[in-house]
Image (cartoon, helix red, strand yellow):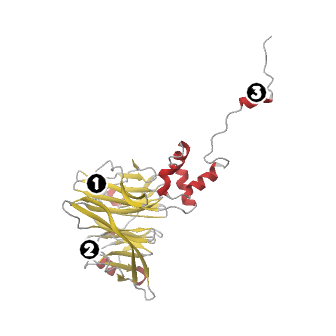
Amino acid sequence: MTGVSTGGAGSSAAASPPCPSQLIPNLPDDISVQILARVPRSQHPYLSLVSKSWLSTIKSPELFRTRSLLRVSECSLYINLRVESSIHWYCEQTLQSKRALVPLAPIPQRLIGPSPSVLGPKIYIIGGSINCSPSNNVWVFDCRFNRWEMGPKMRVSREFSAAGNWGGKIYVIGGCVVDNWASSINWAEVFDPESGSWAAIPSAIEVRDKWMHASAMIGSKLYAMADRGGVVYDVGCGEWGNVPKRLDLGWRGRAAVVDNVLYCLDYLGKIQGYVVEMDVWKDLRGVEKGLPTFLCLTMVNLDGKLCVLWEGKGSGKLVDIMCAEIEVKKDSDGGLIGKILRLDVILVAPQGASIAHCLAVEL
């Protein structure tokens, strides 16, 4: 007679599947993820060595979502450096208690005149020319996983356009020749990452221009400086207008906005700020002795501080890439006061290297 299992307690226990391993013993994984999310990103390489499950968690979108919800995201500096005909990307990280620029994977295409924009953990490189022809390509760098991917293409090709983000969407204007119906109707576009598509923004003929040499978001307004005066697009109400005359005359080169004040260089090579509500330019005082007179400067709002980068002197065939972080605020009279919190060399590059863009990403 063939024996039949009776399903006793011993055999039942033996047949039970093993419990899946937990990230932290005796804790639910959702609690463990919240604990790991609070650890500074500088320590993530060490956490990744604990186990395969920790490595997977450290690199997961869930961890970055949790960091954002817990408001423990950290602002990281990303730099686009041009060396002769090549483009190099770097991210500033803290390694062994020291800040250092870590090289990143190169963008798959060599572009001239693209417009960068940051949305969440991703850097969008919009348009630009390829072999002297404007492109509608959009390359996306996911800063969480350090990889490039092709994003949804724009409706028209562009180079040297103006771009900014507001309300979780990217807005881009200009950079295309209005010589046909398609480029005319799509002179301005908006990208919605939820739908993954671009849509045209209605624009008046009189505001359309091709080249945009500088742009910035101040509140809900995208300011774009063109060859023949600037234009403003109010994202909130969908209205177009002209850049105020005083802002137009004083805006020189790259700019950054901190606390609704637009900072850029003046014609003497010093940092100045445009106070929107007063329609006035003011010198940034308190940094004169610590900073040189600039010929060119790239800047970004880095976690509420004004971060400025420039090419220093260097020696021989090398040039120092300099960085200063400045705490900026208004005094009781409405003047702009700066305090240099950091000033150092962040990279030594070949002579002739220039900073194309600097961006801030929260991770």
Mark found first going from the N terminus, 1 or 2: 1
Q: CA distance from mark 1 to mark 2?
A: 23 Å
In the image, residue 243 lies at what x, y percent? 35, 75
Q: Please, is residue 304 above or below residue 149 in the view?
A: below
The three-letter code of the residue at mark 3 reads Ser
In the image, residue 38 lies at what x, y percent? 56, 58
Give 340 or 298, whichever is nearer the viewer.
340
The residue that label 1 is drawn on is 87
Q: Secondary structure at mark 2?
A: loop
> How many numbered marks, from 0 up?
3
Give 66 or 40, whichever is nearer the viewer.
40
Q: Secondary structure at mark 3?
A: helix
Mark found first going from the N terminus, 2 or 3: 3
The residue that label 2 is drawn on is 294
Residue lying at the far top of the rendered structure: 1
Residue at image position (40%, 52%) is: 141
In the rendering, which numbered label is found on residue 11? 3
Mark closer to the observer (2, 3): 3
Q: Please, is residue 18 above or below residue 84 in the view?
A: above
In the image, residue 94 lies at what x, y percent? 42, 59
- The quarter of the rendered structure image containing the N terminus is top right
